[in-house]
C-alpha cells in the first residue's frame, strides 16, 4: 500500500520538508493520523492537506524533527486540554503546520485515536504498522476513505484526552469534511 515512490510524490505535492514523511512513518512512538493518513491511503480521493496531525510518546521526537527537518515547535498554552499540545512549522510561507499531541504510552495514543467521532478517523500509522478500531476492518475504513463516506460512531466515547471544547472542534471538522466532498452518515 505504501511505496517509496508514492510517499515521495505525496510529500512533494504537499510541500513537506525533504524526507519528513518517509521518516515519520518509520518512527516507533510517532503516530500519523488524520488527513495525512487519508492521503497516504488514497491520495486521489482526498484533497490536499491543511495541516499534519501526529502523536508522539517522547518529546525527543520533536527535537529530532527540529534538528533534521527544521520544524520549530511551540506549546499551546491552554487550560482547555489535559494533553500537552504543540504546533510546529518548518520555515516560512506556505509550510505545513504540524499539530502534535504528546502522550505517555501506546495505550493512550490508541485511546486518543480510537475515540474519534468518525470511523475514517479511527486509524493511525506508526513504525510502518496501521492500527485501526477493532470494531471496523482496515478494509472497511480504507474503502470509506476512498468513497468519501464518514460514519459517526455511535455509543459513548472516552473524551479524557481531548480538549474540553472537543464538541466544537468536531463540529468544525465535520463542516470541513463536507466541504471536501465527504458524506457524513449518522
Image (tube, helix red, strand yellow):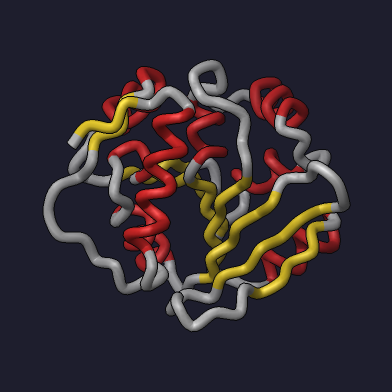
Q: Residue 162, relative to residue 19: is it above or below?
A: below
For image coordinates 77% across by 28% down, the residue present is: 12
Q: Residue furthest bottom?
A: 79
Q: Residue 81, relative to residue 136: is it above or below?
A: below
For image coordinates 61% across by 36% down, the residue present is: 49
How many numbered discs? 0
In the figure, residue 120 lies in which quadrant? top left
Q: Is residue 157 left or right of residue 178?
A: left
Q: Residue 143, relative to residue 19: is it above or below?
A: above
The percent position of residue 14, horizontal first and vertical second, equals 71, 32
The percent position of residue 60, horizontal first and vertical second, equals 69, 71
For image coordinates 85% across by 57% down, the residue present is: 70
Between residue 145 and residue 24, name the one nearer to us: 145
The percent position of residue 155, horizontal first and vertical second, equals 12, 53
Q: Is residue 143 left or right of residue 41?
A: left
In the figure, residue 19 lies in which quadrant? top right
Q: Is residue 178 left or right of residue 133?
A: right
For image coordinates 62% across by 73% down, the residue present is: 76
- The image quadrant where one finds the C terminus is top left
Between residue 66 and residue 167, name the one nearer to us: 167
Q: Residue furthest left?
A: 155
In the figure, residue 151 lies in which quadrant? top left
Amino acid at each position: 500500500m505504501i511505496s517509496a515512490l508514492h510517499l515521495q510524490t505525496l510529500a512533494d505535492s504537499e510541500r513537506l520538508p525533504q524526507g519528513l514523511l518517509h521518516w515519520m512513518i518509520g518512527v516507533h512512538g510517532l503516530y500519523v493520523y488524520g488527513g495525512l493518513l487519508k492521503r497516504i491511503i488514497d491520495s486521489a480521493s482526498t484533497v490536499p492537506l491543511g495541516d499534519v496531525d501526529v502523536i508522539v510518546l517522547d518529546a525527543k521526537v520533536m527535537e529530532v524533527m527540529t534538528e533534521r527537518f527544521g520544524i520549530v515547535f511551540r506549546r499551546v498554552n491552554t487550560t482547555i486540554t489535559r494533553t500537552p499540545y504543540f504546533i510546529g512549522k518548518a520555515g516560512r510561507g506556505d509550510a505545513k503546520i504540524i499539530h502534535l499531541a504528546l502522550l505517555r504510552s501506546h495505550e493512550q495514543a490508541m485511546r486518543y485515536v480510537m475515540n474519534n467521532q468518525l470511523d475514517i478517523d479511527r486509524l493511525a500509522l506508526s513504525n510502518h504498522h496501521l492500527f485501526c478500531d477493532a470494531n471496523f476492518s482496515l478494509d472497511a475504513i480504507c474503502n470509506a476513505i476512498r468513497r468519501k463516506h464518514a460514519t459517526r460512531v455511535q455509543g459513548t466515547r472516552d473524551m479524557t484526552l481531548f480538549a474540553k471544547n472537543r464538541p466544537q472542534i468536531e463540529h468544525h471538522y465535520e463542516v470541513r469534511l463536507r466541504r471536501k466532498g465527504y458524506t457524513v452518515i449518522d
